[in-house]
Image (cartoon, grey):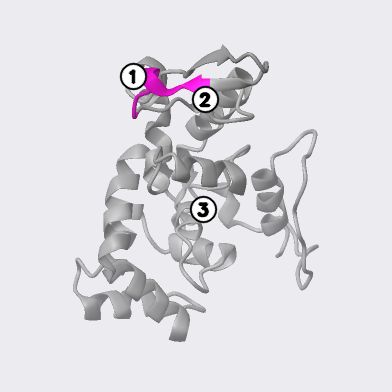
Amino acid sequence: MNIEGLGPRKVEALLELGLVKDASDLFTLAGRDGTNGIEKVKKKSKKKNDDSITSDTSATSDAVSLRDIPGWGPKSVSNLLASIERSRQVSMSRLLYALGIPAVGQQMAEDIAGAFTSFPDLWEYISGEKGKNEGYVRLSEIHGLGGKTLDNLIHFGHDASSRALVAKLIPQLIIKNENKQGEVASTSRASSFFRGKKICVTGPFARFTRAEITEIIIKNGL
């Protein structure tokens, strides 16, 4: 969900330390950090005669603190947790895109989200809760959705691990509806300036996040 400050290296560190197993665990980090259950007892250091430093492992535990990760100072941790908290509010289309379903890009995710009144309503069709045939029929009514993309969507919804992830993730989020009545302005196009162009958004920006810039580009025809 494009969480600012959470790059591949930090994700790898969190996975290696067992602090997260999937995306839903990110939203419980703040509650589990520090004195709330995952703090790591710092190792005691002592000098040898040769002035080298060794660690006394007798004071360790299985718990881990974010602040113990090399290169993660208090400010870095604070900024990351604040960014995760902000990302709890997410539009239906951004959530659908973030699930990483093959061939479901940002534009397709917007088109799909715009055809439903809520994410639970959409998920009932994707996951087969409304019946597999009903899911195919309802989703195939969306302009541009069909073939392999539709198969990927249905396959994702029927996969046990995917269903478990979504079940854990949804209670952690505030999902903004994105229906055809335009409850979220990002479903409309301000212009066609970027239509037909290939654009890569990368690096830091002074006034906007990458997610905000991407949304502006989409609004203007991409």
Label at residue 94: 3
Dot placed on the residue nearer the N-terminal end, 3 or 2: 2
* Residue position for label 2: 68
Where disc 3 sits, the SS reads helix
Foreground: disc 3 or disc 2: 2
Please state the horizontal and vertical placement of residue 157, each as a whole percent of the image: 31, 67
- Which residue is most to the bottom? 147
Mark 2 vs 1, N-terminal side? 1
Q: Amino acid at mark 1?
A: Asn
Image quadrant where one finds the C terminus: bottom right
The tag earlier along the polypeptide, 1 or 3, is 1
- The range drawn in magenta is 55-62
Closer to the camera in the image, 6 or 45: 45
Look at 67% across and 56% down and name the residue there.
219
Q: Residue 35: give x, y in percent of width and height.
A: 36, 15
* Few, some or many residues within 10 Å of mark 2 (<14, 14–19, 20+): some
Q: Amino acid at mark 2?
A: Asp
Figure check: 19 above or below 54: below
**206 left or right, relative to 3:** right
Of residue 201 and residue 19, the one placed in the foreground of this image is: 19
Q: Position of residue 83 (x, y in %)?
A: 56, 32
Mark 1 is surrounded, within 10 Å at the Cα level, by few (under 14), some (14 to 19) or many (20 or more) other residues, namely: few
Query: Residue flagged by tag 3: what amino acid is it?
Result: Arg
Q: How many numbered marks have been drawn onto this rendered protein structure?
A: 3
What residue is shown at x 32% (from left), y 22% (from top)?
37
Can residue 7 be seen in this snapshot?
Answer: no
Q: Nearer the viewer, mark 1 or mark 3?
A: 1
Q: Quadrant of residue 73?
A: top right
On the image, the x and y values in percent for residue 80 come to 56, 30
Circle 1 sits on which residue? 36
